[in-house]
Image (spheres, rainbow, N blue to C red):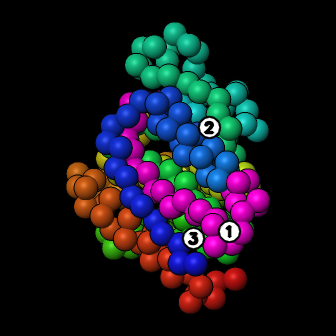
Amino acid sequence: MQPKIVFEDLGCMDFRKSWDYQIALFDERIKQKILNRALPSGQQVFPDNRLLFVEHPSVYTLGKSGDQNNLLIDENFLKKLNAVFYQIDRGGDITYHGPGQIVGYPIFDLEQFGMHIKQYIYYLEQSIINTLGEFKIIASRLPGATGVWIDPDTPRARKICAIGVKAGRHITMHGFALNVNTDLTYFNYINPCGFQDKGVTSLAKELNEHVDEGAVKVVLQKNINIEFLNYKAKMYF
């Protein structure tokens, strides 16, 4: 079966509302997988894989195994920033989402792609690395950490895209946050992804100019489709 990816741009949406939408899509696919077990192969239903892009008002999220001490401010200061905080059910530690950032939530059935979770994260990272390359930014991975980094093997290592996911019955949710025109001062109030000795950057900072977020979305969607729909022809693993 050839997997299908359906794209949705949710625009600017409250984090809680988008989380609820993810949960609904995730639960629907889990339910169908369970139903398929009792059906002959010819009657089984395979929902599409959904790729959501969204931008959030300012919010800090902490993964289920993260350390809340990595949020360096109290509730009163959060209110001054007009930001909110959620502890959620993804992996990873704390990160920030806000205006000028492309947040991607793939609701993918990894069984349809024949992938395991480590491959999935690898291909997400590769999609973002390839996208940044088209904007003349050289990015790569930091050994022992998820996400996409610039100059990872130097004292100037800085993260441009955070990744934190959840998977159940091979269905994924949550995903990545790519800094495009993000106000990076919001990262001063956390230890991003638990790191105290690494920086954070954005396309705008690296290129020293405002970047067309719509153009980045087009390239990013294209590269995700390439990496995930054509991965069987690749031999990364």
The reply to whether residue 70 is in sight is yes
Q: Position of residue 41 (x, y in %)?
A: 69, 72
Q: Which numbered mark, 1 or 3, is in the foreground of this view?
A: 1
Q: Local crowd at mark 2 within 10 Å, few (<14), some, or many (≥20)? A: many
Q: Earlier in the sequence, mark 1 or mark 3?
A: 1
Q: Which residue type does callout 3 highlight?
A: Tyr
The span picked out in magenta is 33-59
Callout 3 secondary element: helix
Residue 1 occupies quadrant: bottom right
Q: Position of residue 45 (x, y in %)?
A: 59, 62
Q: Position of residue 85 (x, y in %)?
A: 55, 24
Is 41 a magenta residue? yes
Q: Which numbered mark, 2 or 3, is in the foreground of this view?
A: 3
Q: Which residue type does callout 2 highlight?
A: Ile
Q: Local crowd at mark 1 within 10 Å, few (<14), some, or many (≥20)? A: few
- Residue 94, numbered label: 2
Q: Residue at x 63, y 67 (%)?
A: 43
Residue 64 occupies quadrant: top right
Q: Earlier in the sequence, mark 2 or mark 3?
A: 2
* Residue that badge 3 annotates: 123
* Residue that badge 1 annotates: 111
Quick check: 1 above or below 102?
A: below
Q: Residue at x 42, y 61 (%)?
A: 6
Nearest the viewer among 66 and 103 is 103
Q: Residue at x 76, y 38 (%)?
A: 65
